[in-house]
Every structure is written in C-alpha cells, then in structure tokens.
Amino acid sequence: MEVSIFNPAVALDNTAEMQFLELADFGPGSAGAFWSQAGGQSPWEMHPDCDELLQIIEGEIEVEVLPVGNGDSHVFSVPAGSSIVIPQGCWHRQTIMQKTRQFYLTPGQTFHSTAEDPRQDKNR
C-alpha cells in the first residue's frame, strides 16, 4: 500500500516559476502544483476521461470554459482559498490575475490545443 501525504504550498517553496511539480500519482493522472506571476493565458486543455480540480492556494485566476459541443465560453473568477471543478470533456484555459500558487488534481489524460476554438481542432 502506498499512501501520499504532501502539502502543496510547502512543496512549491523550492520550485521555479511554471515548474509543474508532480506530487503523487492519481489513477492514470496526477496530483501536482505550480506557481506563476500574473500574465498571459495558458493554452487550452481538456480531459476526455475525467473531471479536473484546481485549487488556488494563493492569488487569483480566471478560468475560461467551453461547453462540450457548441456554445459560448464562460469565464469564472477563482480567488485564493477557492476550488473549481472542470467537467470532463470541457476545453478550458486560465489567466493568472496575480501571483498564484495552485494545486491541481487530474486523474486522467490531458489534451492541449492552441487553436482559437479547440473543439474544431482536428490536429490534436
């Protein structure tokens, strides 16, 4: 039996900006953390076989989520101490609004896209 105990805030103390720190395996995915200064938008990502949990330890992000199929995006503000669950199959990206330390739990695959609307991207 392998049990993982970790504190993502402490684990981030010795990491470089945008260094994705894997803290534990979680099914075929992982639990991890990273930090970043305020700045640009991330590429789109989507998890075809699982939901994803993002928890903001410090700072604030905005998460843009595209519904499965068609429809307009929705933007959610996620301040420090809050979490957001991104539904399975929804493309999403984030904008770091201020220096942020973040924990994520992604128990499955991750696809990425830089297309304007990744739902239409045939090259992923």
Image (cartoon, rainbow, N blue to C red):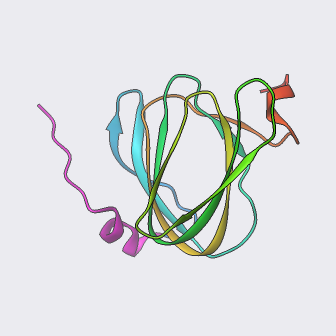
Residue 115 in magenta stretch: no
Name the outermost residue toward the left.
1
Q: At 39% across and 73% down in the image, what residue appears?
A: 14
Range of magenta residues:
1-15
Position of residue 96 measured from the top left corner of the image (x, y, whole percent):
64, 67
The residue closer to the viewer here, 24 or 103, is: 103
Picture residue at 71% right of the left edge, 33% below the top: 67
Q: Residue 1's spot in the image, x, y percent?
A: 11, 31
Classify residue 5 as left or right of residue 56: left
Residue occupying image coordinates x 52% and y 22%: 49
Query: At which x and y percent is residue 59?
Result: 52, 74
Compared across the picture, whether 114 is left or right of 4 comes to: right
70, above or below 66, in the image: above
| Residue 7 is a magenta residue | yes
Rendered image quadrant of residue 48: top right
Q: Quadrant of residue 122?
A: top right
Viewer-side residue, 22 vs 86: 86
Does 72 sit left or right of 52 as displayed?
right
Q: Nearer the viewer, residue 73 or 54?
A: 73
Q: Is residue 92 visible?
A: yes
Residue 72, image quadrant? top right
Looking at the image, can residue 17 be seen? Answer: no
- The quarter of the picture where the C terminus appears is top right
Q: Position of residue 43 (x, y in %)?
A: 74, 49
User: Against 90, is 44 above or below?
Assistant: below
Q: Is residue 85 above or below residue 29?
A: below
At 75% from the left edge and 66% from the top edge, which residue is drawn?
40
Q: How many marks?
A: 0
